[in-house]
Amino acid sequence: MTPPKLSLYIHFPWCVQKCPYCDFNSHQLKTTLDEATYVDALLADLEQDLPLIWGRTINTIFMGGGTPSLFSATAMQRLLSGIRALLPIRPDAEITMEVNPGSQEFDDLSAYRESGINRLSFGVQSLDNAQLKVLGRIHNADQAIKAIAKARQAGFDNFNTDLMFALPEQTLSGAKDDLLTLLDLAPPHVSYYQLTLEANTLFAVQPPAGIPDEGLQQDMYFQGQQILADAGYQQYEVSAYAGDNNPAEHNLNYWRFGDYLGIGAGAHSKITQGHNGEIIRLVKQKHPQTYLNTVRGDKRIIEQKTLSENDLLFEFLLNHLRLKEALPLQRFSNRTGLPPAQLTQFFNEAVPADWYHSDGNQIQLTETGFLNSDSILQQLF
């Protein structure tokens, strides 16, 4: 089985302040940030993982967190130079950095651009100052707007903006106004997603008042979908909308069940083994200090698993069913090593006939099927 495209994910685990809805591996920065030590650790982590990906080229890089933009452009330059010295990167690779509008003065975005970063992802979340306060964000609407303007001035013509809906006490008209305010900025890409109360977050323990009910959440979703379509954005994934046919290439690789190597505290990897086609998953030490203490040894990996046939079918669909595009049977076979008949049999037996179409080469969800993708996945439990 030929391995799929390979991406590199780099995790930066620190934030200025932990948001009450966030369930990512992020930690409030309480001391001076030691950039050099963490960059050294990332490169050491990568060097030890090289045998997993010998001979393969990195197609995309994503720097997530936490807040990667807490690290200076100089640190990013050293990190990317170190990565290039260790393994090949596609010359036109998409290299993305997540940005918190409240964590930078944004006078140095051009230096990030010069380091090789060519795409940004802004955690805007809302342009309503009252909502930003409830969400625990450290920026206000004006700072977010100015950050996006600074990005354009620095030459970033490719960036994403995250925006939430179904916020506490939010009305249908409030969600509409928030989205239209964002679209006034003409972002090239929008991630429009629902606030959810995830386990192990402050909101899960102390839920905010006024979370919209399920019916209103659905109305907000459909309203946003229509507004974005009318503005010329193409929905290609449940919560992702691209302008000018400009999807996030790194995320597409996840959803198409491509491979990714993760370095950094708590980073996950999914790697197809070239010699036998097996797929393994790895997880690195989560706490930043533990990661730094163990990164030069076997204890840096806390979980390792080879995916079973059942895992492969479920995980492939978990990712691919988020996409609007058709599901090619050959892609399923190439990515999992399983026969196409295994996928078609599942759909024929477990999925209502009006939820999908199949021509023998691909499976295409209908709009009803797309909206019920979670119900399709539940049939695998």
Image (cartoon, helix red, strand yellow):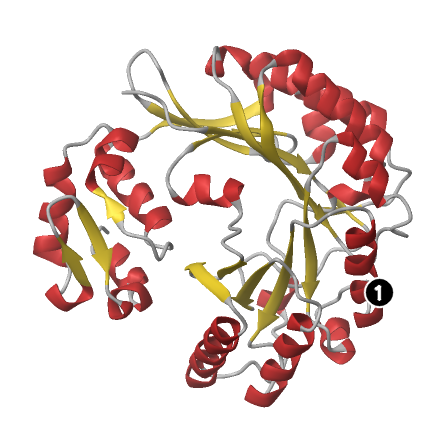
Residue that mark 1 sits on: 143
What residue is rendered at 51% in x and 50% in y? Answer: 247
From what the image shows, is residue 91 above or below residue 372? Answer: above
**Label 1: which secondary element:** helix
| The quarter of the displayed image where residue 116 is located | top right
Q: In the drawing, does residue 273 fall left or right of residue 82?
A: left
Q: As rendered, which of 309 and 362 lies closer to the eye?
A: 362
Horizontal relation, residue 225 to residue 145: left or right:
left
Give the left or right position of residue 171, taking residue 293 as reference. left
- Tell me what residue is drawn at x 76 percent, y 19 percent: 40
> Which residue is found at the position 28% from the left and 38% from the top?
311
Residue 143 rendering spot, x and y as whole percentages: 84, 65
Looking at the image, can residue 212 be seen?
yes
Q: Is residue 344 left or right of residue 193?
A: left
At label 1, counting other C-alpha atoms closer than 10 Å, the crowd grade (few under 14, some 14-19, many 20 or more) is: many
Q: Residue at image x 20%, y 40%?
A: 329
> Can residue 169 be seen at all in this image of the molecule?
no
Q: Position of residue 338 (x, y in %)?
A: 19, 31
Q: Is residue 282 above or below residue 323?
A: above
**Split into 4 quadrants, where in the image is the N terminus?**
top left
Q: Position of residue 207 (x, y in %)?
A: 60, 74
Q: Nearer the viewer, residue 4 or 233?
A: 233
Q: How many marks?
A: 1
